[in-house]
Amino acid sequence: MNKEFIEIRWHGRGGQGAITAAKIFAGAAFVSGYPGVVMAPSFGTERRGAPVMTSLKISRDKIYDLSPIETPDIIVVLDHLLLAEADVTHGLKPGGIIVLNTPKSFESYNLKDYRFATADITAISVEAGLPHGMVNTGIIGSLERAINLVGMEILIKGIEEEFSTRKPEKNSLAAKIAFERTVTGG
Amino acid sequence: MHIIENGNVAAALGVKLCRANVIAAYPITPQTPLTEKLSEYVESGEMKAEYIPVESEHSALAVCIAASSAGARSFTATSANGLLYMHEQVQWAAGARLPIVMCVVNRAVGAPWNVWNDQQDSISQRDTGWIQMYCSDHQQIIDSVIKAYWLAEKVSIPIMVCYDGYILSHTYMPFDAPDQEQVDAFLPPFKPDYALNTEKPANLNTVTLPDVRMDVRGELAHGYMEIRYLLQEEMRAALAVAAEAEKRFADIFGRGGDPYIEPYLCDDAEYIAVGLGSLTYQLRVCVDALRKEGLKVGVMGVRFYRPFPDVAIANALKGKKGVIVFEKALSYGYEGALVSDLKSALYEHLAGTGDLPMVQNFIAGIGGRDIRTEDLTQTLRAATKSRVAKEPVWIGLKL
């Protein structure tokens, strides 16, 4: 993966907090030496439960192109059921990474075209003390494990700042556990 | 301090730093988060202002007109049909010479109904007597709001700060949020020559006759035509004041540039793409790609649309082979409004000199249609090779 310019597309459901997660990751990337970060949510008809996506571009230079990502390096999926429900891998570069919240085993995914990074974020988040279904901080740990870009310390700080009034330690704990348990390969 | 936020927050922060006294707005997508943020600032006490919820955009601007007449620094914001509904008061605010600042979060106008970005809303208000500034990123949004208050109050003309809906309003990127002390140093408190005052009552903008006449004090008062002539003259003179604002801003905040246009790789360019807003930043990526192919292209953003910086534009385009104007709006029945204005400026300043460039017009992104960078690059490349047959050409049209 070219670490000078990275395109990440996030897929979740309305209300799952994919945008907040992408925003935290953007902030951490900026702090760690990427002056160009642009996070653009999909626009218009969001509603709770429906598939939503947001794109995050990370660059060593200021980003002038705000158009949607067409060929992402990485896909982050907050709900494994979206793999069947929406065309989440659309445009994913050959050898691209899919970071997936799933209760299924790593081995159950086809590794031929893409690399996977999986963890049961839903269970991990409950273990960290978060309400069932709060997965947007855990997935940050999985993403970092998969691409090793900004460092967990900066991400933890970003998570605790974003959630300063909403269980900051439990949220950062979810990310830490997810980082440890994420299985990568391919 | 650099923060990562969306464009609406950049605008709201600018308004807060300018210490606006009165905010009146009616929510409309994609402007809504901007007014929500301002109401949060006021509710939490972070901002000392009167936030007046109103039942329509027409009332929002009516409140700002009243507040500004009473000497309050006033702010409103809207989009699309909200701006159109405001239109009567838009004209009034300019005629009354009130330095209101309004953010227009650019969105397509109905019908058919559409909430996505183009620039038909603000372009359709071109002739209302408001100054119009266009922003290409979040830094320009917050900086333009701050500059706009200074300029508006200096020339007594209201200003629209326009930025692309969703593409800028809902997209997150880093920008420098200035310190309150810096903004206070740049922008003194609003002190109009006359503000409504029960001790010193006055009639404002009453029926004004076609011809001049003696007023109640026995002094010769302007007729309607003189008042409107002065709006035109002072609007033109505002160009020089905008340059002063830019210089003053650069001195205090350490950033700035040409007040009217934002050229990129234009000096040695043979062909220059021109546009308003974020599209011109996307075009930089196309220019970079075409430069690698050896094509001498550049791109120029127009920051002020009214008053129109005709001299700056003509100077920048003088002697070029071609000018390719990309627009997200048009004057139905002819062509893009910007390209008409630009050709007029070129004719005025370059006709007969042999330095007149060929001009082409493309329409893109109407109603939020994705503008693919690849398509834009292809269009620009083709425009340098040969002239298209029928203009304006709509990019990405699926007919």
Image: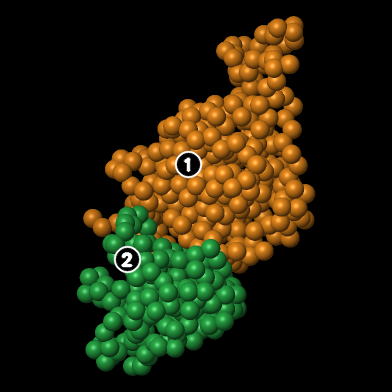
* Looking at the image, residue B213 lies above or below residue B4: above
Residue B314 in the image, given as x and y percentages of width and height: 60, 50
Residue B80 in the image, given as x and y percentages of width and height: 42, 42
* Disc 2: which residue: A13
Which residue is painted at 41% across and 47% down in the image?
B29
Q: Amino acid at mark 2?
A: Arg
* Looking at the image, residue B18 lies above or below residue B195: below
Q: Does the rendering let one see residue A147?
A: no
Q: Amino acid at mark 1?
A: Thr
Chain B: colour as depicted: orange
Q: In this rendering, would B195 be left or right of B399?
A: right
Q: In this rendering, would B346 be left or right of A116?
A: right
Q: Quadrant of residue A112?
A: bottom left
- The kind of secondary structure element at disc 2 is strand
Q: In this rendering, would A161 be left or right of B118?
A: right
Q: Quadrant of residue B265?
A: bottom right
Which residue is painted at 69% across and 17% down in the image?
B198
Q: Crowding near pointer 1: few (<14 within 10 Å), some, many (20+)?
A: many
Disc 2/disc 1 C-alpha distance (Å): 29 Å
Callouts 2 and 1 on one subunit: no
Mark in the foreground, 2 or 1: 2
Which residue is painted at 59% across and 47% down in the image?
B44
Q: Does the rendering let one see residue B364?
A: yes
**Chain under disc 2:** A
Q: Could you tell me which quadrant the C terminus of chain B lies in?
A: bottom left
Residue A131 in the image, given as x and y percentages of width and height: 38, 69
* Looking at the image, residue B69 lies above or below residue B46: above
**Chain under disc 1:** B
Chain A: colour as depicted: green
* Residue B17 or residue B372, whichever sits in front: B17
- The kind of secondary structure element at disc 1 is strand
* Disc 1: which residue: B78
